Amino acid sequence: MKIFNLSYRQWQKRNSEAFHPRPKAQQRQLRQQGYNNRGWANVRQSWQLLTATFDTSRMNDVSRQAVWSELDKETAGMTHIQKAEYALDRMKKRFNQLQENYQ
């Protein structure tokens, strides 16, 4: 049986890949909140916990600098407001892509 085009094993793998890189303290906290990667109901609930606690601050400085450098090149000559609107549009598109991949 597949839910959202992912099999049970794919859901488990996705959860594990999002869970294990986190600090031990955060793993412990997630387990206390109900993280359990066994059984359909638990696997789905665990994914919701993981996405609710996604930590964007873990992105390293190098990748941040690369993103901003690329954005500067793409928005050369634009006003600050135009740059902000452009960046917001790109983030919305990327968010929608990620959401489609995990549903």
Image (tube, grey):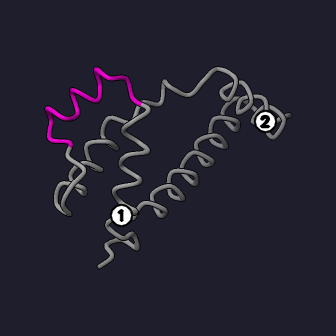
* Picture coordinates of residue 31, whole percent (x, y): 19, 35
For image coordinates 51% across by 51% down, the residue present is: 95
Q: Amino acid at mark 1?
A: Arg
- Residue 67 shown left or right of residue 50 in the figure: right
**Amino acid carrying mark 2 in the image:** Glu
Mark 2: give few (<14), some (14-19) or many (20+) Cα within 10 Å: few
Give residue 42's quadrant in the image: bottom left
Tell me which residue sits at (57%, 45%) in the image.
Answer: 91
Quarter of the picture containing the C terminus is bottom left
Circle number at residue 100: none
Label 2: element kind: helix
Residue of label 2 = 70
Residue 32 magenta-highlighted = yes
The percent position of residue 30, horizontal first and vertical second, equals 23, 33
- Tell me which segment is drawn in magenta: 22-35
> Which residue lies at the image location 64% right of the left edge and 40% below the top edge?
87
Tell me if label 2 and label 1 are in contact, CB under 8 Å: no
Left or right relative to 33: residue 63: right
Marks 2 and 1, how far apart in space? Answer: 36 Å
Residue 20: image location, x then y, percent: 39, 36
The correct choice, above or below, for 65 with respect to 70 in the image is above
Q: Give percent across and percent down for residue 84.
A: 63, 35
User: What's the magenta bit mostly, secondary-structure-wise?
Assistant: helix
Marker disc for residue 9: 1
Is 95 magenta? The answer is no
* Residue 95 higher or lower than 59, as above or below: below
Give the residue drawn at x 67%, y 43%.
86
Quarter of the rendering occupied by the N terminus: bottom left
